[in-house]
Image (cartoon, helix red, strand yellow):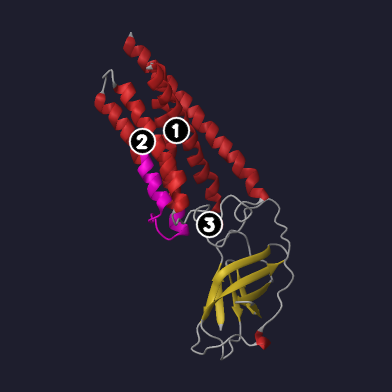
């Protein structure tokens, strides 16, 4: 039986490599019969006693190291039984990759892992700037100062920009990883509700106009919105099943999906997006101060 396995990668496949299939605790050596720029075709002799089952694949190459593909192919046969010992083989020694500075390969997200440098830091930047807005609203409630109110408004407007960008990049990532632009995932739904809550903050301010109470009412609403942000995006997803890494036992930000090369870019990206968000916040705050100065003349 011949089995084809596509690869979503911009890199050329090596000229030759070994492929071993795993069935439970037993290994089946294969013959590689064709290699194209984006796929490899292998051939195995299926014994008559082999049951229908999904097989994992291990690819061994000197250049790319050892690649694991879970449920890489499915063998269908009506017979029952285990794989006979004569069809088992020992796996080659794992190869150490010599990739230099490159992105790690993950079977589920493949090349879309590059979006990690955009999507995740954008949400971190939003959390950071919404936290500043939360502190400003608490200070506004304590002092009833227009200065703290302007800081809270600038933080929410800036944070919403990054929240919308996070939703857009997340939807794009979901399309190519989970097969749909939007799935019923607790963290996705929580992110959407959070953005809608903060949008309500702007609607509240707009509806009240120049009312003297707008600062205090908006501050109370902003405190409530930030508490909901923490609950919806940081608490509830950890106690529910989620497709996102780091939730419900899924790995996140560890050796599984962040190697040293990616860490060298990811952490500076978080700092960079956070700095960009703060700079945009200061611009928005200066605009608020200028507008207030002109209206008070």
Specify the quadrant of the image occupied by residue 105. Answer: bottom right
Residue identifier under label 1: 130
Mark 2 or 3, nearer chain start: 2
Label 3 close to label 1 by CB (< 8 Å): no
Q: What percent of the width, then of the height, locates residue 218?
A: 33, 27
Mark 2 crowdedness (10 Å alpha carbons): few <14, some 14-19, many ≥20: many
Instruction: Look at the image and tell me in which quarter the C terminus lies.
Output: top left
Q: Residue at x 44, y 38 (%)?
A: 162
Residue identifier under label 3: 249
Residue identifier under label 2: 198
- Rounded to the nearest angstrom, the CA distance separating label 2 from label 1 is 10 Å
Q: What percent of the width, then of the height, locates residue 181?
A: 39, 55
Mark 3 or 1, nearer chain start: 1
Mark 3 or 1: the one toward you? 3
Q: Which residues are magenta?
A: 173-195
Find out whether residue 188 is within the magenta segment. yes
Instruction: Look at the image and tell me in which quarter the N terminus lies.
Output: bottom right
Mark 1 crowdedness (10 Å alpha carbons): few <14, some 14-19, many ≥20: many
Specify the quadrant of the image occupied by residue 268. Answer: top right
- Rounded to the nearest angstrom, the CA distance separating label 3 from label 1 is 28 Å
Q: Residue at x 61, y 41 (%)?
A: 267
Q: Residue at x 49, y 32 (%)?
A: 277
């Amino acid at each position: 039986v011949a089995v084809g396995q596509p690869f979503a990668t911009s890199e050329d496949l090596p000229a030759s490599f070994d492929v071993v299939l795993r069935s439970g605790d037993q290994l089946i050596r294969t013959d590689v019969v064709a290699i194209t720029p984006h796929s490899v075709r292998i051939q195995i002799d299926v014994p008559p006693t082999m049951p229908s089952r999904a097989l994992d694949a291990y690819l061994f190459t000197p250049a790319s190291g050892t690649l694991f593909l879970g449920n890489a192919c499915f063998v269908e046969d009506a017979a029952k039984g285990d794989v006979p010992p004569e069809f088992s083989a020992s796996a080659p020694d794992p190869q150490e990759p010599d990739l230099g500075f490159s992105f790690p390969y993950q079977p589920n997200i493949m090349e879309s892992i590059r979006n990690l440098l955009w999507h995740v830091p954008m949400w971190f930047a939003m959390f950071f700037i919404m936290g500043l807005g939360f502190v400003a609203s608490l200070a506004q409630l304590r002092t009833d100062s227009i200065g703290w109110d302007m800081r809270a408004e600038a933080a929410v407007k800036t944070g919403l920009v990054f929240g919308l960008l996070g939703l857009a990049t997340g939807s794009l990532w979901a399309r190519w990883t989970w097969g749909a632009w939007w799935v019923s995932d607790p963290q996705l739904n929580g992110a959407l509700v959070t953005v809608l809550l903060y949008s309500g903050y702007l609607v509240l301010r707009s509806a009240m106009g120049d009312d003297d109470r707008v600062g205090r009412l908006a501050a109370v609403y902003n405190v409530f919105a930030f508490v909901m942000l923490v609950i919806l995006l940081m608490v509830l997803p950890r106690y529910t099943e989620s497709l996102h890494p780091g939730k419900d036992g899924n790995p996140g930000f560890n050796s599984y999906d962040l190697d040293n090369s990616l860490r060298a870019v990811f952490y500076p990206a978080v700092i960079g997006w956070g700095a960009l968000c703060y700079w945009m916040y200061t611009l928005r705050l200066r605009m608020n101060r200028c507008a207030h100065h002109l209206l008070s003349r």
